[in-house]
Image: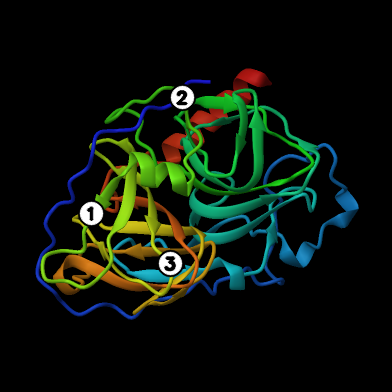
Amino acid sequence: VEVGQVAPPYQSAAMPAESTMKRPADLSDVPDPGQKRQHVGSLATGATKDAVDHSKVLSHAMELNMDKSETLLVRTSTKEWLTTSQSSGVARRLIERRGGDIARATTVVRFAPNQSFPEHTHTGGEEFVVLDGTWRDGYGDFPKYCYIRNFIGSSHTPRIGEDGCVILVKLCQMHPTIHPEPQHTAWTDLGPAVVRRDGREVASGEGSSAASFHELVIFDSPLETVKMMVLPGSGATVRIPVPKGGRELLVVDGQFTSRLGTHDERSWCRLADEVHFADGHLEVTTGEAVVYLYSKEGHLASAEIDLEEARGRELNLKMKKA
């Protein structure tokens, strides 16, 4: 396993003046049971084919929450789990998605215990955060608080142990040439204590009574910056910067509220940079527990691999294997 190094500290770009925020949207598009269905993926070893509820199988192609100029909150805890293979052993809660079997997507995926999967190649790239359990493949074992990037063209053979696994995964959101990466990079042991110890403390700003928070830059490129963040609990008020290029947040632990609503565990939000928040910040109030966040920023207008190119790469691989 190639273990990633923490990137240099990131300085957020200045935010333009305030303007009216769009009304926040929530994820409500679940496939109609009457639509034509198609299973996605291969049958996992250890899962039973008869266990599939076909009314909850992910539809073949869809467009969901892909307007990156829109600020929105998706509370995945309120969404139905949709099966994603020829078994009930893998299920998804959709956040954003464009496409069918090859899709640009952000998704919470749950793997049932004791499964293995055939080797597959990510023709559009993949990144994910382990939210619970342990992810296992040929690169190693990755428990909660690990962050993994598998670049375009990389392959692996997932296997899930008795503790199961839940991840937040992003597919087809890399670019093949602007910023090439190693085939696989993993950052391990990124829990809250490590973020506070190795990250930087971000003050709320001069004259503000809001609490400070900690952030640790994990990955930094011309296309995006990925961080892990820790916000204090006990009902603290915290001002989270919204930089040029926007920000998205996924709550791994804890919860907070904002003008968008309640961000409970595994909630995701997109903060579009053209939606100008007061002083370039989103003000939040945390719950009693410390809040641990995955953050990606500066990426909403960045170039990504063309889906047809990713599909072409997939077809070429299938032809070579035939």
- Give the percent coordinates (x, y) of residue 235: 40, 75
Is tag 2's residue or tag 1's residue first in the polypeptide sequence?
2
Is tag 3's residue or tag 1's residue first in the polypeptide sequence?
3
In which quadrant of the rendered view does residue 316 lie?
top right
Q: From this view, report whether residue 34 is shown above or below residue 90.
A: below
| Residue at disc 3, secondary structure | loop
- Give the percent coordinates (x, y) of residue 185: 46, 27
Going by the numbered disc 1, the residue's amino acid type is Gly
**On the rendered structure, is 194 left or right of 318?**
left
| Residue at disc 1, secondary structure | loop
Going by the numbered disc 2, the residue's amino acid type is Val
In which quadrant of the rendered view does residue 274 lie?
bottom left
Please name the residue that numbered disc 3 is placed on. 233
Please name the residue that numbered disc 1 is placed on. 245
Tag in front: 2 or 1: 2
How many residues crowd around disc 2 within 10 Å: few (fewer than 14), some, or many (20 or more)?
Answer: few
- Give the percent coordinates (x, y) of residue 252: 51, 56
Query: Residue visible at 45% across and 30% down?
Result: 152
How many residues crowd around disc 3 within 10 Å: few (fewer than 14), some, or many (20 or more)?
Answer: some
| Residue at disc 2, secondary structure | loop
How many residues crowd around disc 1 within 10 Å: few (fewer than 14), some, or many (20 or more)?
Answer: many
Q: From this view, report whether residue 90 is shown above or below residue 7.
A: below
Q: Quadrant of the C terminus?
A: top right
